[in-house]
Amino acid sequence: MTATLWGIGSYRVGDEFVTFPVADADLQRDMATANKNLATLGVERGARALVTSMLAEAAQYWPVQIGLLMAGTQMSCADASRFDAFRTRMFLRGPTYDTAIGISGAVLDGLDDLDVPIGELFSVVPVVAARAEAVERLRAAGVPARLWLHVGPTIAVECDVGAGAHIDADEWAVEADSDEIRITARNPRAATIDAAPTGLRATVLTDPCACGRADARILPGV
Amino acid sequence: MTSGGSRYYQPELETMDRAGIEAIQEEKLLDLLPYAYERSALIRETWDAAGVHPRDIRTLEDFRAGAPFLSKDAIRDFRDRHGDPYGGLLCIPESELTGIMSTSGTTGDPTLVPEQWGGGRDDRAPALVREFYELGTRPGDYFTFMLFTFRGPSFAVVHPLGAVPIFIDHTPDEIARFVKLSLEYRPVGMYNISNVLISELARVAARDGIDMVDVFSSYKGVVHGGEQLGVRSERLLAEWGVETFEHTAVGDAAAATECREHDGCHFWEDGVLVEHLDPDGTDPVPDGTRGELVVTGLDDRVAPLVRYRSDDLVDVTRAVCGCGRTHGRLWIQGRKGDEVVVDGRSVLPRDVWAAVESLDETAAGLFQIVRSDRDADRLRLRVGHDGTTRDPGALSGRVAAAVASAVGIEPEVELVPDAQLLALGPPHKIPRVAKA
C-alpha cells in the first residue's frame, strides 16, 4: 500500500493538525487543481512568482510549485514564517515578480519587525495572493490582495472579481455546518475525507461568478 | 542501479578506485572549463586577470597548479559592480531559469541562486539518495523530513528509494506532532535534528512523561547538520538510542554525510572536485590537518563554482573508509569568518562549546564569539544562561574558567538570557559569531 504513497501531508484545524496520506494519483489531481488556481491568478508562461509556504504544507504547495514549473514560470521560494520574512523582502526588492503566493500573517509580522512598509514592498507585485489572516492587513496597507484560502487539504483562490475564493468543484464539495466549512473529496483518495471539519468559519456562495468559474466560492469571516 | 542486499546504492560508483574517480573528474572538468569560461562573466574576468585560459588546463594537475580562485567576496563584488544579481556566474540566459532561490544568509546577506530544474545535471544520484540508502531506507519505509526550509523538492530524495516522506516544520512548536507521527508511522530515518529540537524533546519528555526510547525505536538513523551537536545533545540522543549522522554542505557545490562508520562525511567525488588548501595561501595541506575547503561543482551547467574558496575550515582524507567507499571524507572544523586568533592561538566556536555546556546554567550551549577582526587582543564571549543563577558575577567567572581550561585563553564573558540569543537565529541554530 505505502509504495503508491507520495507523502504524508497535514493541515491545521484550530490548534490541532490533521494528518492525511497523499497517493501519487492524488498528487496528479492536486496538480490539476493548482493549475486552475494559478490560471485564476493569471499566471502565464514567462512570469515570475514568489511562493511562501512551510514544509508541513508540502502536500498543498508542492502541486503549486510543480504547476508553476509546468506553466513555464520562474519561481522563488521563501518560508511563510516570521523569521524568514527577510527573504521575502530580499526577493521583492530584487527581481521583478508578477505574483506573490501564500503570503501569511507571520510573514507580515516579520516584515513589521524589520520596519518594512508592507504597502510599499508589495506595491510592485501586480497579483498578491494572501492567506486569510493576511489579506485584510494587506488591503489596509493599500495592496489589492486576493484571498488564498487554506481549506483543509486543499486551497481555494479568489479571482479578480473579489467575491470569495473558488474551490475546485471537480475535486471537492464544501458545505457550511454552523458556519464551519466541512469538506468532502468527490473522488477516491488515499485519505478518507468526508465532511471533514476545517476550522474555517465562512459562508459558501454558489451563485455564478462574473469571472466564469462555475465552482463554489468561500467567503470567510461571515 | 541498486545492489540488492549490499549497503551501496550505486556500488560501482561508490567503491571505484582512485584512478577511476580522477578519470571521471578530469573528463568532467575539461568539459566544464571552456563552457564556464565562455559563458560566466566572473569566471572569464577572473581567468583573464590571472592570465590563464582553459586551453592551458589539460589535466587535473594543471588545474590544481594554475587555475585561479573564486570567492564569495568576489561574487558579491561582481554583483555590486555590474548590478548582476547572480554575481557573474550565470551560464545560461536568465529566461531559461526555472527558479531563483537564495543562500541561507547566515553568514551575510543572502545571494541569489539560479536554478534550472531537470537541466544541467547528468544521471548520477541526486544528493542524499546514496546516504539515505546507507542509513537503511528501503521501499515502503516512512522517512521524517523536519526541515527549516521548503525551497524545492528536498524531500523527493526518498522517492527513488520507494520510501514515503512525512513533512514536519523544524520548530519546537512541532515536537508534539513529531512524537505522534513517529509513533504512528514508525519512520526509519529523520532529516534533520538540531540542538534546539533536542532540548525541546527533553523538556517535553520530562513534562509529559514521554518515553523517547519508544519514540525513536524505529529510526535506523537521524541526520543532523547546520551546526554541530553539543555534548548534552549527544548524551540525550545516546540515552534515547538514536544513531546520528552528521551532514554538511560542501562549499555551496555539494553535500557530505557520514556513513555508518562515523569516520568523516563522504563527499561524492564524481560530482565535486574538492581541494584542501592552506587557508592563507594556495598550497595543499596534508590530510588530517586543518585547511580551507575549495570546491569545483563538476555537474553544474547553470552557475558553476570553479575553484571556489568556501571559507570552511576542514580536515580531509581520501583513504578508503571502513565502509569500503573510496570517495573522500571531510570533518568540518568551522568557518574562517568564525575564527578569532588571540596571541597567535586560533579559536573556533567548537573549541569552546563543551566548556560552555559543562555548567548547568549554560547547558543549552548558546554562545557567540564577539569579534571585530580575525586577530584580537582578547577572547570575548556572549553566553546565554537559563536565568536560575542568583550570582551572575560568579557564573561569569565559572564560565571563564571552564573556557580557559579548554582553550588556554582566559575569555571576557558577557552573560545574556538564553531567549535573547535564540531570538537571533533561524529555528535550528544561532549565529555563533557576532560583530563587536
Image: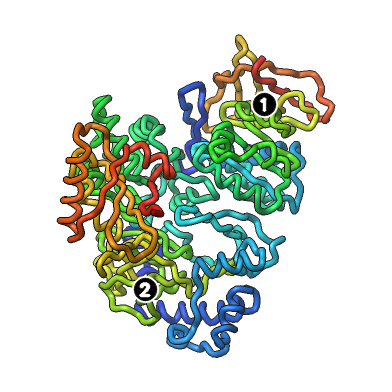
Calculate the distance from the C-alpha at mark 2 to the C-alpha at mark 1. Answer: 53 Å
**Position of residue B225 in the picture relative to residue B237 (left or right):** right
Q: Residue at 64% across / 46% down in the picture? A: A50
Is label 1 in a helix, a strand or a loop? helix
- Between B151 and B28, the residue placed more toward the observer is B151
Q: Residue at 29% across / 54% down in the picture? A: B380
Q: Quadrant of residue B386?
A: top left
| Residue B130 drawn above or below residue B164 | below
Label 2 and label 1 in one chain = no
Q: Residue at 25% across / 58% down in the picture? A: B351
Q: Provide the chain ID for the residue under circle 2.
A: B
Mark sitting on residue B279: 2
Q: Which residue is mark 1?
A: A136
For the residue marked with disc 1, what is the amino acid?
Glu
Crowd rating for badge 2 (residues with CA inside 10 Å; few <14, some 14–19, many 20+): many
The answer to whether any part of residue A185 appears in the image is yes
Looking at the picture, how far across and down is residue B211, in whole percent? 24, 31
- Between B367 and B138, the residue placed more toward the observer is B367
- Between B81 and B268, the residue placed more toward the observer is B81
| Residue A53 drawn above or below residue B105 | above
- Between B277 and A198, the residue placed more toward the observer is B277
For the residue marked with disc 2, what is the amino acid?
Pro
Q: Quadrant of residue B303?
A: bottom right
Looking at the picture, how far across and down is residue B89, in whole percent? 60, 69
Q: Provide the chain ID for the residue under circle 1.
A: A
